[in-house]
Image (spheres, rainbow, N blue to C red):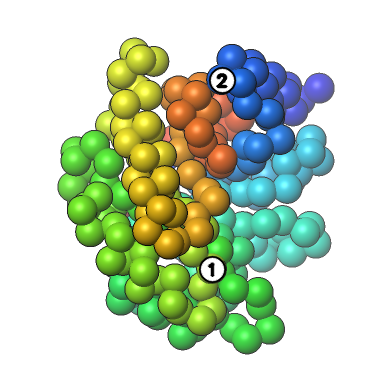
Amino acid sequence: MTTIASNLQAVRIAMTEAATAAGRRTNEITLLAVSKTFPAEALREAYQAGMPRFAESYVQEALDKIAALRDLPVEWHYIGPIQSNKTRAIAENFAWVHSVDRLRIAERLSEQRPAHLPPLQVCLQVNISGEDSKSGVHPAEVHDLAVAVAKLPNLKLRGLMAIPAPGDDVAAQRTPFARLRELRDQLNKQGLHLDTLSMGMSHDFAAAIAEGATMVRIGTAIFGTRDYGEQNS
Ligand SMILES: *Cc1c(COP(=O)(O)O)cnc(C)c1O
């Protein structure tokens, strides 16, 4: 087995253990392979090992890989920061976007979504631990944004995403994930229909699964350590 294939297997086993410990079924939780900074050949290898979903954080890098892997029925997820001048490329090339945090961006994505494609599946990124102040909507503002985004014709609002501040202690890791779940539940009581909690990365996916994650976004544990080189932005 290749390293990527055995890493994928190890992640799936760890996901199953975390789900079982939480009294959940593994098939309630979708594994997303975060492939930013890795070359198309690494994604192809992961695809051949059974991974059909990749998440990218940089638009131009993603477009190159999407072109290189045209022959595979990959489901592409965008999880990075969204600049206004990149919304068209995102609307045209991705199935999901996890990082919507303002209405103007959502409106552009809806306007620019090609008519022949299904609605773009959207999560709102929430600034849940109040640390990374540059991205994510404030929890107090999520309701109004969700109501507005849910009305846009070519988007399908699916749920919430968060990237909590990193920490090693599993008990402490659970707190922000629990907060995101509570926020989702509260929105659903207020009439929204959110089925997705996109939360959990390589170092904290067990805690996220314990708190109800339905999608975990895992890069390092599948592909290895990233070398940003001059890519970093
Ligand atoms: C890079 C990234 C991940 C994956 O992080 P790992 O620690 O490598 O698993 C998940 N989510 C987002 C938004 C990212 O940018």
The answer to whether residue 38 of the structure is visible from this angle is: no
Q: Is residue 184 left or right of residue 39?
A: left
Q: Is residue 233 above or below residue 103?
A: above
Taking the spot 36% from the left edge, 40% from the top edge, the residue there is 182
Query: Contact, CB < 8 Å: mark 1 with mark 2?
Result: no
Location of mark 1 (residue): 156
Q: CA distance from mark 1 to mark 2?
A: 29 Å
Where is residue 159? Give x, y as percent: 47, 54
Residue 26 horizontal/vertical position (percent): 68, 29
Q: Residue at x 56, y 20 (%)?
A: 22
Q: Which residue is mark 2?
A: 22
Residue 65 position by quadrant: bottom right
* Amino acid type for the residue under numbered disc 2: Ala
Residue 105 vertical position relative to residue 168 in the rendered view, above or below: below
Relative to the observer, which residue lies in front, 91 or 189? 189
Towards the viewer: 11 or 66 = 11
